[in-house]
Image (cartoon, rainbow, N blue to C red):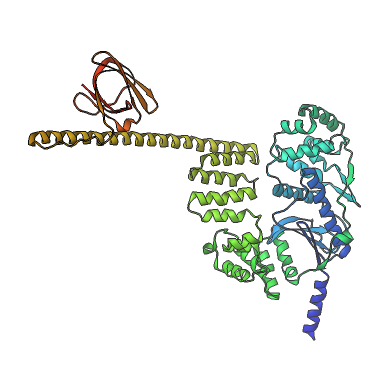
């Protein structure tokens, strides 16, 4: 009888919890259907209005955002939003809304996951502050309510003025889109308002000095909460680990979180609890499975055995990166781990490029990509990655550090390229020298064979097997060098001019008076030198022998 009553009580408690979902938001609640839908309605209106201001119609999030709405009086703590086992997790006070700081954090999260570049200066946190005070009134939204006095900076006043002023509100979306796309302030202001930023600054200075900040009411997203959001009972497996997940999101001590997951497992073991235990026990490492503590490894392997409910973070920590990537293809960390496994720079750069595309606002990824591309001798790509890192630097100090590192790598690159050019030049010279030596050896062997033939009466073999040649005797007056082509100007013994060409110096034998190999010098020959030139019918030189 006691077991039956306990089971009925559990079913009753579970039935009190419902869940509903829209976009990146997942709401769990025991506060009733109306409160559940009202919370999700407010979240979706915020996402819509904030996305419209950024020029992003459908803001995404790399990880789901789970919101827990409790009955009034159940939870007295300040609403929070933190990262937990399977994504972002926060609380929502039933019947009201979280404070502005909560929405400021949500706005910053959306900017991090949806913008490619960083807005200059303090524009991003100030923009988040501006929308943190957004008010939902039926189907309409009030924008521009002043935050706490300490947050009413001049930058806040500028954004508030531009977004609430009917003459500038529409154009301000162009401004923010340009800034979010990496444009500098001067260019972005001119593109948006067709006048210099200095003119806007005068208007803002007067507005800020006045200290009167009226709000503006705009239409919200056309949603009917009672029809737009369907409710279903919350899964018991999710409800069991919810207290432990909340502790993780709040940043509680590991021992407290671990105890909560183990309590859930004692009630009924499941993959969600195993993942939580594995993440906490393996928190000291984010490396592949071979470095995991044994207890963390066992818990994560038990989780991974459930193909349907295994968690993305647990799979990644276990080293099952392909499964993790399929579950959350937008998570850049998977590609960082794949890159860490690679020993060669080309494959490492490939995975780092994927990570940079998924998380383009993280300068450290672009920096590591640039280093891998440099090691792979992909110098133009490395330079682009270094500059991308500078563009998304979090502050001027980090940007200067990245610039210095880029300049150091560029100097190393120039030195390597100069050394490579020198090596290739030496190889070319060595090859020419080799061909000349082989030609000289061939001539000497032919001469020796001819001399031997004269002594024995045998027929001498010709060393030259090319086109017939003619011998020229005279003086060499000048050599015109045009790249690898040499043009020789000479006079025969009777003073008549003659011209010859050397198209491939590596194939021409040039001998000095002592039958030693020499090189032609470009320009006039002072004084003209007596020479014997063997040449073909096309006046192409075969040998040059100075007398």
Q: Quadrant location of the C terminus?
A: top left
**Residue lying farthest to the right in this orientation:** 138
Q: Nearer the viewer, residue 104 or 410?
A: 410
| Residue 479 as seen in the image, left or right of residue 258 | left
Residue ranking furthest to the top: 495
On screen, residue 297 above or below 45: below
Instruction: Inspect this view and state whether residue 126 appears.
Output: yes
The residue at the far bottom in this view is: 1
Task: Determine the image quadrant of residue 269.
Answer: bottom right
Check the picture and name the quadrant holding the N terminus: bottom right
- The location of residue 304, given as percent across then percent down, is 61, 68
| Count of numbered badges drawn on the protein | 0
Where is residue 91? Give x, y as percent. 78, 59
* Residue occupying image coordinates x 80% and y 37%: 172
Q: Is residue 544 visible?
A: no
State the image quarter where residue 316 is shown: bottom right
Q: Position of residue 472 (x, y in %)?
A: 25, 22
Kindly identify the residue that appears in the image at 75 percent across and 56 percent down. Answer: 24
User: Is 351 left or right of 106, judged from the image as shown?
Assistant: left
User: Is 531 placed above or below 192 here?
Assistant: above
Q: Is residue 121 above or below residue 65?
A: above
In front of the other: 400 or 216 = 216
Depth check: give the residue in front, 252 or 289: 289
Give residue 78's position: percent from left, percent from top.
Answer: 79, 56
- Quarter residue 515 falls in: top left
Task: Give the residue at the far left of this rendering.
Answer: 456
Question: Could you tell me which residue is drawn at 55 percent across and 59 percent down?
Answer: 287
Image height of 53 relative to 288, above or below: above
């Amino acid at each position: 009888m006691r077991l039956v009553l306990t089971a009925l009580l559990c079913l009753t408690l579970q039935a009190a919890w419902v869940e509903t979902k829209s976009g990146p938001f997942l709401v769990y609640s025991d506060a009733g259907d109306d409160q559940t839908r009202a919370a999700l309605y407010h979240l979706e209106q915020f996402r819509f209005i904030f996305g419209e201001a950024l020029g992003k119609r459908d803001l995404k999030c790399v990880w789901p955002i789970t919101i827990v709405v409790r009955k009034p009086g159940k939870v007295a703590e300040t609403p929070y939003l933190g990262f937990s086992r399977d994504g972002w997790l926060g609380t929502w006070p039933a019947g009201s809304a979280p404070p502005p700081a909560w929405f400021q954090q949500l706005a910053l999260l959306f900017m991090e996951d949806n913008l490619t570049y960083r807005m200059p200066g303090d524009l991003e946190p100030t923009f988040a502050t501006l929308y943190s005070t957004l008010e939902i009134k039926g189907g309409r939204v009030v924008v521009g309510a002043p935050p706490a006095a300490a947050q009413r900076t001049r930058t806040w006043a500028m954004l508030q003025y531009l977004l609430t002023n009917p003459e500038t509100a529409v154009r301000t979306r162009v401004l923010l889109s340009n800034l979010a796309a990496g444009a500098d302030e001067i260019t972005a202001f001119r593109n948006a308002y067709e006048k210099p930023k200095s003119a806007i600054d005068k208007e803002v200075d007067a507005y800020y000095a006045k200290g009167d900040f009226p709000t503006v009411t705009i239409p919200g997203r056309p949603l009917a909460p009672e029809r737009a959001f369907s409710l279903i009972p919350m899964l018991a497996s999710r409800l069991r680990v919810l207290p432990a997940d909340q502790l993780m999101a709040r940043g509680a001590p590991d021992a407290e979180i671990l105890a909560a997951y183990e309590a859930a497992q004692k009630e009924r073991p499941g993959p969600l609890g195993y993942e939580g235990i594995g993440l906490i026990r393996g928190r000291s490492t984010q490396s592949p499975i071979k470095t995991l503590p044994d207890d963390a490894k066992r818990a994560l392997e038990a989780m991974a055995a459930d193909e349907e409910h295994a968690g993305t973070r647990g799979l990644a920590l276990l080293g099952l990166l392909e499964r993790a990537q399929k579950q959350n293809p937008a998570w850049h960390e998977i590609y960082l781990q794949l890159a860490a496994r690679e020993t060669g720079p080309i494959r490492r750069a490939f995975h780092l490029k994927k990570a940079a595309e998924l998380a383009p606002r993280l300068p450290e990824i672009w920096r590591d990509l640039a280093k891998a591309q440099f090691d792979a001798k992909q110098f133009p790509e490395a330079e682009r990655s270094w500059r991308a890192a500078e563009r998304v630097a979090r502050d001027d100090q980090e940007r200067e550090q990245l610039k210095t590192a880029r300049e150091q790598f560029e100097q190393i690159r120039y030195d390597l390229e100069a050394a490579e050019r020198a090596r290739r030049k030496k190889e070319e010279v060595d090859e020419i020298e080799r061909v000349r030596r082989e030609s000289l050896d061939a001539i000497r062997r032919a001469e020796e064979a001819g001399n031997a033939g004269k002594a024995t009466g045998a027929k001498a073999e010709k060393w030259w097997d090319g086109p017939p040649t003619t011998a020229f005797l005279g003086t060499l007056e000048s050599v015109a060098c045009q790249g690898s082509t040499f043009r020789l100007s000479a006079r025969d013994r009777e003073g008549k001019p003659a011209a010859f060409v050397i198209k491939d110096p590596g194939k021409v034998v040039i001998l000095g008076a002592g039958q030693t190999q020499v090189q032609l010098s470009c320009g006039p020959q002072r004084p003209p030198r007596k020479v014997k030139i063997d040449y073909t019918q096309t006046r192409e030189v075969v040998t040059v022998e100075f007398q």
